[in-house]
Image (cartoon, rainbow, N blue to C red):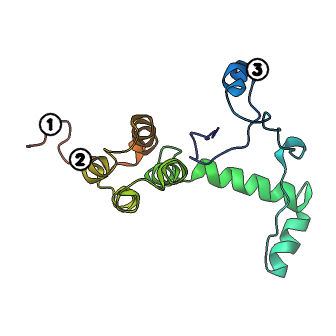
Amino acid sequence: MLVFDDATGSQVDAPPGSEHAALLALLPGPPPAAPGRPRLGVVARKVTLLPRHWEWLAEQPGGASAALRRLVERARIMGEPAGGRRQAVERCYRATMALAGDQGGFEEAARALFAGDRPRFEVLIAAWPTDVIAYALELAAPGWPADKSHGKELPT
């Protein structure tokens, strides 16, 4: 069973809920074990900064980690809106890579997605499973460039 975060298109490790018990009973083998997670979802990673950056961070209230978290949150708020083109394209790509990476035309469809060529993307994914198509189009929707018709029907 694959679970995706609709905001990012990334697979997530999520323990199945009790509402999935009947579905899980149909799967062969023992039920999947829930992965362990650090408290509050904190993940330690390596960050490389210049000495002057570390000095500045050390002077901030709450220390370096708290200052970095505040900077990241401020940048997220001030940056591109959540429904922006880049995020939509990347989340669609992540999900379709996991769900349809072995489907015919995947690479060409990915090229069309990144190029913002919706008609070509739709043609290339037409043979994929219908649920995958619907999910890909939903994730990619905010990423398609606006047409130049300004609400008028485009000639066909």
Residue at the spot of label 1: 152
How much space separates mark 1 and mark 3, taking CA atoms? 48 Å
Marks 2/3: CA distance?
A: 45 Å
Residue 20 position (above or below residue 52): above
Q: Nearer the viewer, mark 2 or mark 3?
A: 3
Of marks 2 and 3, which one's residue comes earlier in the chain? 3
Task: Tell me if residue 69 comes above or below residue 129 in the rendering.
Answer: below
Residue 45 in the image: above or below residue 4: below
Sequence-wise, which precedes: disc 1 or disc 3? 3
Q: Earlier in the sequence, mark 2 or mark 1?
A: 2
- Label 2, on which residue? 147
Task: Say which amino acid is labelled 3.
Answer: Ser
According to the picture, the residue beneath numbered tag 3 turns out to be 18
Q: Residue at x 57, y 42 (%)?
A: 7
Q: State the separation of the CA atoms marked 2 and 1.
A: 9 Å
- Numbered disc 3: secondary structure: helix
**Residue in front for this viewpoint, 104 or 52:** 104
